[in-house]
């Protein structure tokens, strides 16, 4: 009889932990909102948040307009398969006229119980177009490897 009460107490404790974890997860997801877009860091943050929220139209609006921009359909196809278990940390930014570089670190979660996650530093690139900062590069999984690639035409003899 005592063992049944002890087991029942453990099950209640585990249930309370699960409910608390779910509540915390939901509250944290709802609490994130877009920030100001006047700085390169703000644009990087808002772009990543838009992808995480599934607001792909807004995310696409942060891409620089030039001849090599991916189509919206191709962008959507690429972003739907982005890894959700990657966090992006924004460290600092350097602005030089119409160009900016934002140092970021991608934090990958572990895939097994005896593994630790890992981090990868990289740099996002932005340009100023019509008074707004626009992205020209961000590391994967928030960017397609073939975006903004110049198409090279073969030279005919």
Image: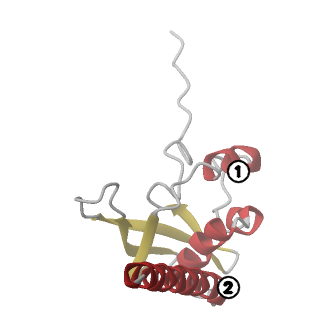
Between 15 and 151, the one lying in front of the other is 15
Location of mark 1 (residue): 76
Which dot marks residue 30?
A: 2
**Disc 2 residue crowd, few under 14, some 14–19, many 20+, Cα 10 Å:** few
Between 96 and 115, the one lying in front of the other is 115
Where does residue 103 sit, x and y in percent of width and height?
36, 74
Where does residue 105 sit, x and y in percent of width and height?
35, 71
Q: Nearer the viewer, mark 2 or mark 1?
A: 2
Left or right relative to 145: residue 91: left
Residue farthest along the top direction in this orientation: 157
Between 114 and 47, the one lying in front of the other is 114
Residue 25's place in the image compared with 74, above or below, is below
Where does residue 3 sit, x and y in percent of width and height?
38, 79
Q: Is residue 129 visible?
A: yes
Residue 121's place in the image compared with 16, above or below, is above
Q: Quadrant of the N terminus?
A: bottom left
Left or right relative to 140: residue 62: right
Displayed quadrant of residue 56: bottom right
Left or right relative to 39: residue 56: right
Q: What distance separates the C-alpha of mark 2 from that of mark 1?
A: 23 Å
Where does residue 60 sit, x and y in percent of width and height?
70, 62
At mark 1, the secondary structure is: helix
Residue 146's place in the image compared with 84, above or below, is above
Residue visible at 75% across and 45% down in the picture? 73
Between 146 and 46, the one lying in front of the other is 46
At mark 2, the secondary structure is: helix
Which dot marks residue 115?
A: none
Lower sequence index among marks 2 and 1 = 2
Displayed quadrant of residue 110: bottom left
């Amino acid at each position: 009889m005592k063992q049944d009460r002890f087991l029942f107490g453990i099950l209640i404790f585990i249930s309370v932990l699960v409910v608390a974890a779910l509540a915390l997860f939901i509250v944290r997801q709802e609490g994130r909102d877009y920030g100001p877009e006047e700085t390169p860091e703000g644009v990087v943050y808002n772009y990543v948040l838009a992808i995480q929220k599934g607001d792909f139209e807004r995310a696409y609006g942060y891409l620089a307009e030039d001849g090599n921009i991916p189509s919206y359909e191709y962008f959507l196809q690429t972003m739907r398969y982005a890894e959700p278990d990657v966090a992006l940390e924004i460290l600092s930014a350097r602005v030089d006229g119409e160009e900016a570089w934002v140092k970021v670190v991608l934090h990958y979660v572990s895939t097994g119980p005896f593994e630790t996650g890992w981090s990868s530093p990289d740099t996002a690139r932005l340009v100023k177009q019509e008074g707004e900062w626009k992205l020209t590069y961000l590391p994967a999984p928030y960017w397609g490897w073939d975006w903004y690639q110049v198409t090279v035409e073969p030279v005919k003899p």
